[in-house]
């Protein structure tokens, strides 16, 4: 099911974002008097399509990893004299640049719209409350304490962990010191400062909070069985609701998180459970497993016993983030800008060696996040789409021949020189662009495969 969700989520995400991107090219081309011959979602052999009254062929093609808009162009085929004025190559450089730039700009517009819908509809977000501070870490050195709630990171106000993570990366990267404002458990608002001189937020470890030495708040549950899965490993071994697991293979189990971590790391293994009692009982259990995020996870087949105040405690830690239409637009613009800024910073720091290329993800990585976000619901999927849409826009605007940014670079040179680059120069540029793009894709695929093998 996890793999199926990832595939479906990936196809939907790519289809929606490519459609929006190509619609930008199509819509502006039509408005500026260029004839569009074909609007395709996907590459390769057309599966089905139809012809519009405007003479444009609309098709869905076999390979759902992109799309294109084919415009009338004398460089790609014969054009009837009466149609020459509608050819792309006959238009002024400003018109051609506007058509090319429209694709990435529509991706930014999609992100803005997605964030606006999220903020208007409202989302449930976990308050950025610190659950644990690891010793000998930047968080410990800054004096952060369990129970502290982050309310401001640098100049950014934060209301949930999503906003906090984006702010940490966008504001914190490249700084020696990062000021924080927190509200303590006693209600006092205090200032803290993270020393980041020896910290690489964009290093090999993608878990930013772990690098800083912080764990988000989570309810601490005793390792007491609430219910067992019928015919599951625990039920078969004789585990009963109310049993408290105090050790596995002699390894102490303090709470439910310890239990999940120990079992999850041992798919299909045979383990010995120690059950609290006088005297303690010992049960031998053969775990099962399931696949999640490309790796096998051990399963015991139990659910925790929840304390009576669990629901009220959880509600206290969840905040609904909702705004009116105008304020939501302001927040959406801010979120789109933050995502754009962070993407640009990350790419630049990879180029200059200040960020690990392991942060680069390919189709498999995107598919994994697509599946996770689909499972979490519509708002989570919209957030995922917004972030990927911004990334797609930024990548397309890079001044690399073959991408939209490369074409814009050619048009800028043409505007300055008063004439376009020679055909040979453009061909060489396209070859360089294809080589760079191939290298980028190869690194992304390598990282994807390395993650799978590591898991």
Image: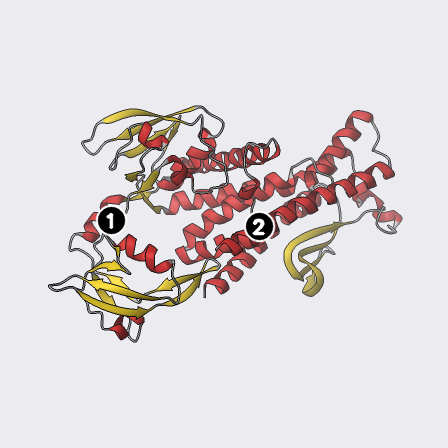
Specify the quadrant of the image occupied by residue 416. Answer: top right
Mark 1 residue element: loop
Q: Which residue is drawn at 20% across and 34% down?
A: 185
Specify the quadrant of the image occupied by residue 267. Answer: bottom left
**Residue 18: percent from the left, percent from the top?**
61, 51
Q: Is 419 displayed left or right of 152 in the figure?
A: right
**Residue 328: percent from the left, percent from the top?**
41, 38
Q: Residue at x 50, y 55 (%)?
A: 368
Q: Mark 1 points at which residue?
A: 219
The label number, if any, that marks residue 394 in the structure image: none
Per the model, the C-alpha gap separating discs 2 and 1 is 37 Å
User: 373 or 123: which is nearer to us?
Assistant: 373
Q: Residue at x 60, y 48 (%)?
A: 444
Q: Which residue is drawn at 68% across and 37% down?
A: 405
Q: Name the residue under label 2.
A: 17
Q: Is 4 displayed left or right of 60 in the figure?
A: left
């Amino acid at each position: 099911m996890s793999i199926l969700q990832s595939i479906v989520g990936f196809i939907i995400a790519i289809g929606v974002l490519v459609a929006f991107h190509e619609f930008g090219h199509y819509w502006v081309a039509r408005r500026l008097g260029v004839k569009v011959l074909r609007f395709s979602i996907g590459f390769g052999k057309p599966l089905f399509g139809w012809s519009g009254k405007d003479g444009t062929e609309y098709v869905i093609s076999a390979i759902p990893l992109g799309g294109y808009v084919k415009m009338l162009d004398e460089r790609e085929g014969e054009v009837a004299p009466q149609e020459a004025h509608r050819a792309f190559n006959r238009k002024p450089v400003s018109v051609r640049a506007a058509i090319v730039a429209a694709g990435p700009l529509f991706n930014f517009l999609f992100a803005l719209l997605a964030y606006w819908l999220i903020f208007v509809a409202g989302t449930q977000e976990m308050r950025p409350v610190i659950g644990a501070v690891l010793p000998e870490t930047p968080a410990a050195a800054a004096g952060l304490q369990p129970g502290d709630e982050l309310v401001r990171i640098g100049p950014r106000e934060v209301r949930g962990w999503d906003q906090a993570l984006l702010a940490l990366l966008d504001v914190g990267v490249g700084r020696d010191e990062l000021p924080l404002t927190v509200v303590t458990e006693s209600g006092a608002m205090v200032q803290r400062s993270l020393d980041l001189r020896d910290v690489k937020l964009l290093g090999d470890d993608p878990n930013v909070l772990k690098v800083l030495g912080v764990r988000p708040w989570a309810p601490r549950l005793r390792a007491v069985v609430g219910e067992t899965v019928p015919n599951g490993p625990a039920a078969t071994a004789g585990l009963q609701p109310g049993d408290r697991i105090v050790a596995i293979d002699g390894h102490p189990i303090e709470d439910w998180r310890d239990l999940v971590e120990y079992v999850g790391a041992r798919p299909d293994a045979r383990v010995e459970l120690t059950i609290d009692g006088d005297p303690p009982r010992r049960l031998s259990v053969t775990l099962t497993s399931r696949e999640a995020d490309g790796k096998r996870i051990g399963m015991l087949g139990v659910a925790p016993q929840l304390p009576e105040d669990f629901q009220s405690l959880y509600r206290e830690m969840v905040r609904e983030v909702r705004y009116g239409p105008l304020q939501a637009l302001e927040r959406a613009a801010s979120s789109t800008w933050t995502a754009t800024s962070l993407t640009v910073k990350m790419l630049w720091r990879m180029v200059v060696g200040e960020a690990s290329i392991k942060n680069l993800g390919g189709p498999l990585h995107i598919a994994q996040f697509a599946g996770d976000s689909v499972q979490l619901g519509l708002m989570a999927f919209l957030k995922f789409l917004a972030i990927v849409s911004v990334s797609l826009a930024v990548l397309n605007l890079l001044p690399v021949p073959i991408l939209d940014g490369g074409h814009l670079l050619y048009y800028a040179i043409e505007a300055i020189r008063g004439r376009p680059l020679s055909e040979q120069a453009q061909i060489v540029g396209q070859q360089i662009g294809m080589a760079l793009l191939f290298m980028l894709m190869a690194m992304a695929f390598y990282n994807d495969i390395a993650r799978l093998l590591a898991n």
